[in-house]
Image: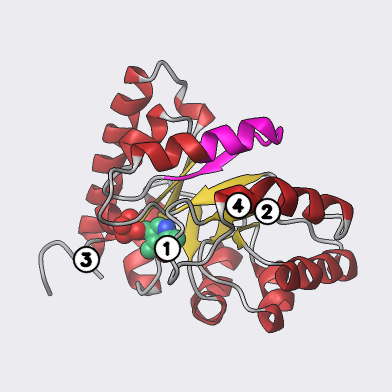
Amino acid sequence: MPPDNGPSDASKGLAAVESDIARACKDARRDRSSLTLIAVSKTFDAKAITPVIEAGQRVFGENRVQEAKGKWPDLTAANPDIALHLIGPLQSNKAKEAVALFDAIHSVDRPSICEALSKEIIKQDRRPHLFVQLNTGEEPQKAGIAPADADAFLARCRDVYGLQISGLMCIPPVDEAPAPHFALTAKIAARNGLKQLSMGMSADFAIAIQFGATHVRVGSAIFGHR
Ligand SMILES: *Cc1c(COP(=O)(O)O)cnc(C)c1O
């Protein structure tokens, strides 16, 4: 097993990330409590995740509904205060399972998903926190709403589908400086009265914290390479 991939190393990874977060919060004159660390555990099994739970981490992110459904119910049964966030693309036919399993969904990105979520939220009487995903780099292969369409889409979420949106999520293009993408996401959130910003991953969470991230999604810096 590679040294950076073992379960004991994941709790070390968590401690290192927490220390970087503390420094970034201090630099940005922010309180640590204004920020939620989502430990992205996709592709890692219960054995790798358990040390991180034991180290006190309670918020985890997954990018596939099926994978999360397979490994999390046993872990959350043993630790009922764990919150699960869906950070990956959602299909309408998985909305039922997603609403049942997740406490937050970061990938609201089209009307058909809004409709499916709205139906399940009412049916199940469960209200996961919802984030609209922006495609700030307007990359054709990437999911998300184009910045120019964001205001209209957010109005539609509210007025047509009755969804309460908590905030915005973005994934900057890999080959660009992330700061302008974080700034744009924060600006669109502010003018729409949204308080939550899901932005920042292993490579750039400190910068995201400067730009007001309320949720950072950190995988490989905690768990090692996938
Ligand atoms: C995998 C993933 C992350 C975590 O990425 P790392 O670079 O491993 O920190 C964050 N957000 C999304 C949407 C992801 O799919």
Query: Which secondary structure lies at badge 1?
Result: loop
> Residue placed at 32% from the left, 19% from the top?
27
Q: Quadrant of residue 18?
A: top left
| Dot 4 or dot 2, earlier in sequence | 4
Residue marked by disc 2 = 130
Horizontal placement of 192 versus 134: left or right? Answer: right
- Relative height, residue 140 to residue 168 (above, below): below
Residue marked by disc 4 = 81
> Residue placed at 67% from the left, 36% from the top?
194
Give the magenta part as a residue range: 185-199
Report x, y in % for residue 141: 43, 72
Q: Which circle, 4 or 2, is nearer the viewer?
A: 2
Callout 3–callout 2 Cβ contact below 8 Å: no
Q: Quadrant of ligand 1?
A: bottom left
Farthest residue toward the top? 29
Q: Which circle, 4 or 1, is nearer the viewer?
A: 1
> Residue placed at 80% from the left, 55% from the top?
156
Q: How many marks?
A: 4
- What numbered label is drawn on residue 139? 1
Query: Which secondary structure lies at badge 4?
Result: loop
Report x, y in % for residue 35: 49, 34
| Dot 1 or dot 3, earlier in sequence | 1
